[in-house]
Image (cartoon, grey):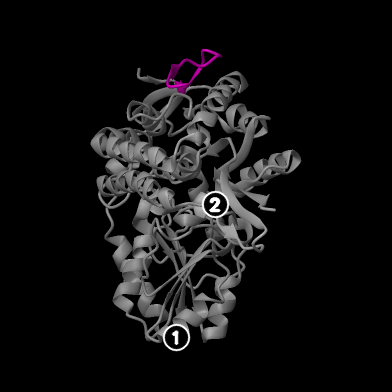
Amino acid sequence: MTRHDHWIGGKTVRPASGAYLPTVDPATRAPGAEVAAGSASDVDLAVAAASAAQPRWARLPAAERSAVLHRIADAVEAHADELAELERECTGKVPAQLRMEVESSAAYFRYYAGILRAHSGRTIDLGDGNHTYTRLEPYGVVAVITPWNLPLNQACRALAPALAVGNAVVAKPSEFTSASTLLLARLATEAGLPDGLLNVVAGTGRAVGTPLAAHPAVRRIAFTGSVATGRQLAAIAADRLIPVTLELGGKSPVVVFADAELDRAVAAAAGAVAANAGQVCSATTRLLVEASVHDEVVERVSESVTRLEPGVHFGPMVTEAQYRKVLGHFADAAAEGLVPATGGAAYEDGPAARGFYVRPTVYAGVPRWARLAREEVFGPVLVTMPFADEDQALALANDTDYGLAAAVWSGDVARGLRLAERIDAGQVAVNGGALTIETPFGGFKQSGHGREKGIEALHEYAQTKTVSLALR
């Protein structure tokens, strides 16, 4: 049985408890590797290593830190197959999804290595008697707590800017999907990142995440995951008066007008179901369609998702708990009288029945009050609603507690932009507009606060100091 230990201070470290947690291959339900069951003692060791290493790293010129980040990107690319295989074993993802995630993981380090060299404060003109300027300084030790849906990718999304600014990091990946983050830490050390700057402590949220967030030497928290856990971490951060970045999911709308390029809109809607089997926080899972073309779009999207093949176009639910949760949504929908246009069940035969696979699902004409229309399912499930005009489209789009992402498809570009500016979401794509590493990512309302990606992420992990010198 393969075992994965912590990575602390530039080396593997066995858990203080001596205990390990089992994992499961969600594509087959076969036993997987074991990961260290961390505890507060392991957190103390990791934070001490980070605290010792961080000051010297912060004093290095930006160009030297940049060079190290470039070498980490090189290492990720050189070990892409190994990283992808570790992800596959614990997530069941399909090759195309794995390839994209590993490529973008390397790209995060490449991007922040580049813009780091232009990251600086500013001078403030207070007249000829003063020289006043600002500095952007690291917090020190940062806690990064990541979920199971995009393990390596979401780790790199936070680690790259945090390290770039001059922080040290203690990362806590999900206990279900720790292996790739642990390998990343080893690769980073081998690429020249000084020992102690990137530590990974595996284990559960209660045993590792909570003591990590509460540790007195941790000066900032970054968390991606559920609203419930986000609230708990926010309470810890509030009590300690430290900042926290929260990315907590969504129930994102995609608005389709009758004059849109329907072929592209339908493909995008079906893609939201297929991508990572819907286990994406920003997935546009509420399809709002102008009434005159609603039935046509529903039929075309349903036909498209019906052609998706498990294990080829999409993977399983990553955890058994999530699998049960999605099936629970189907049961509740049936109790409310909702009938799926397609899907709405697990696979009962064939290879997919061995794993945590859920049939790609579309529910048409779902009432806005239905649980399925309001709660994040986090699976390959799309709900549709018709609208009469632009005002109703906006009202439906904003009728959610979340506000992470949205999309608009319209032949009238002015209307598309007008709606995009009025939707309560952190990022909105109009007619398939690109959202990339360069574009800031984060939510409104219960989708959280703070921003990842883009230059904004560097500012999340830096604090501003003002220095003013009297010249006479």
Q: Does residue 193 show up?
A: yes
Residue at figure coordinates x 54%, y 52% from the top left = 459
Is residue 7 found inside the magenta-colored segment of the image?
Answer: yes
Q: Do the residues labelled 1 and 2 touch (CB within 8 Å)?
A: no
The one nearer the camera, 319 or 391, is 391
Residue at figure coordinates x 37%, y 86% from the top left = 259
Q: Mark 2 points at which residue?
A: 459
383 shown above or below 308: below
- Residue segment shown in magenta: 6-20
Q: Which of marks 1 and 2 is in front?
A: 2
Q: How far apart are marks 1 and 2 (CA)?
A: 32 Å
Side (left or right) of 228 relative to 458: right
Q: Mark 1 points at which residue?
A: 414
Is residue 314 found inside the magenta-colored segment of the image?
Answer: no
Label at residue 326: none
User: Dot 2, how many residues are within 10 Å of its Cα: few (below 14), some (14-19), or many (20+)?
Assistant: many
Label 1: element kind: helix
Q: What residue type is labelled 2?
A: His
The one nearer the camera, 93 or 42, is 42
